[in-house]
């Protein structure tokens, strides 16, 4: 059952809590994510695990669930021998599973259909580099079919997420034009630039005049990068900001593991601290949560913090 309010209306009234890393919770449930399809494999092989992972975040206090379609593409499924019709069913299932996980909990739960970058399909860390050697038009052709399929499944918003460069952002916005579903656009960044090295002000500005975009921001980055990016996104676009960084660690595509000083679960370390979350919200963040290595324990802390501070928003 869909929530009563649109997501845009809810954001106009206050902040909402996003979920955390879906893959982290799936691993905690004992799932093997070594396949190139990553968590998207379980749409076919273990949908009950995906629903259970979503439900864990609902119990933690998440109000927006991001679907397991980040790495789900027609090309990726085809490489695994999954035909186009079945791939369409699995993409639609990603929305249905999140919707079911949020049903009957006595509060509004919104579903964001994840549209990951082209580099996610390559499964080699290319989403942290961008600049794939494809034109904007080629990227648009790649993204449009699954955007159309996901939009038809009835999510509350399409999450154009972990976007590494402005070419892909432009392609995604073109591919989603007229799909009938609101969008958020979220870049993965390093410092004050996209992963491909473009200034963030230019990147955010692409969405400033796009009416369908209801939030702009960043994800899958170091939390410290959000300190400047959140106010910049707000001032550049005059839109609500979405922010869901990693725990502070860095993904090594060669070893397929995380390295660094972040700690996946709570209590909130300094890189993902209560003070930092409050500062993001003061600067314009309205959708706050976590990405890789941020699990239900931490999301519960974020939910408690935002609820306690709601009167000041």
Image: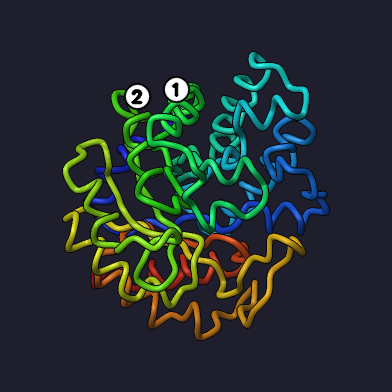
Pick whichever, 71 or 57, lies toward us: 71
In the rendered image, the residue lying farthest to the top is 85
Give the total of numbered labels. 2
Q: How crowded is mark 2: few (under 14 residues within 10 Å), some or many (20 or more)?
A: some
- 36 left or right of 209 in image: right
Kindly state the secondary structure of the residue where label 2 is placed: loop
- 51 left or right of 150 in image: right
Which residue is at a point 24% across and 57% down the rendered structure image? 202
Q: In this view, does 193 lie above or below 105?
A: below
Pick whichever, 30 or 174, lies toward us: 174
- Circle on res. 287: none
Circle 2 is placed at which residue position? 179
Which residue is at a point 74% across and 62% down the rendered structure image? 254
Residue 85 image position (x, y, % from top left)? 64, 13
Q: How far apart are marks 2 and 1 (CA)?
A: 6 Å
Circle 1 is placed at which residue position? 148
Quadrant that contains the C terminus: bottom left
Whether label 2 touches label 1, CB < 8 Å: yes
Residue 262 image position (x, y, % from top left)? 61, 78
Q: Which of disc 1 and disc 2 is earlier in sequence?
A: 1
Q: Residues within 10 Å of mark 1 (few under 14, many from 20)?
A: some
Which residue is at a point 55% across and 41% down the rendered structure image? 67
Residue 162 image position (x, y, % from top left)? 48, 52
Pick whichever, 7 or 197, lies toward us: 197
Which residue is at a point 30% across and 58% down the rendered structure image? 241
Residue 196 image position (x, y, % from top left)? 43, 58
Kindly state the secondary structure of the residue where label 1 is placed: helix
């Amino acid at each position: 059952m869909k929530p009563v309010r649109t997501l845009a209306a809810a954001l106009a009234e206050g902040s909402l809590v996003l979920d955390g890393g879906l893959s982290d919770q799936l691993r905690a449930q004992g799932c093997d994510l070594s396949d190139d399809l990553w968590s998207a494999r379980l749409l076919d092989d273990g949908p009950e695990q995906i629903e259970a992972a979503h439900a864990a975040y609902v119990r933690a206090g998440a109000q927006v669930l991001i679907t397991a379609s980040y790495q789900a593409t027609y090309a990726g499924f085809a490489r695994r021998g999954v035909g186009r019709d079945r791939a369409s069913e699995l993409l639609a299932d990603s929305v249905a599973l999140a919707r079911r996980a949020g049903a009957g909990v006595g509060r509004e739960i919104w579903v964001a259909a994840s549209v990951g970058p082209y580099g996610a399909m390559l499964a080699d860390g290319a989403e942290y580099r961008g600049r794939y050697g494809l034109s904007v038009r080629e990227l648009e052709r790649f993204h449009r079919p699954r955007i159309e399929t996901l939009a038809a499944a009835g999510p509350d918003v399409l999450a154009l997420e972990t976007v590494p460069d402005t070419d892909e952002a432009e392609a995604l916005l073109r591919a989603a034009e007229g799909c009938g579903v609101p969008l958020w656009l979220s870049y993965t960044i390093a410092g004050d630039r996209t992963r491909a090295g473009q200034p963030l002000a230019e990147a955010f500005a692409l969405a400033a005049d796009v009416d369908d975009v209801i939030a702009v921001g960043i994800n899958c980055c170091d939390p410290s990068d959000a300190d400047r990016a959140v106010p910049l996104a707000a001032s550049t676009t005059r839109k609500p900001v979405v922010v869901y960084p990693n725990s502070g660690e860095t993904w090594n595509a060669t070893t397929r593991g995380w390295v660094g000083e972040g700690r996946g679960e709570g209590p909130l370390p300094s890189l993902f601290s209560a003070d930092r979350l409050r500062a993001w919200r003061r600067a314009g963040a309205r959708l706050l949560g976590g990405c890789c290595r941020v699990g239900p324990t931490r999301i519960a802390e974020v939910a408690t913090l935002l609820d306690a501070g709601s009167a000041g928003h």
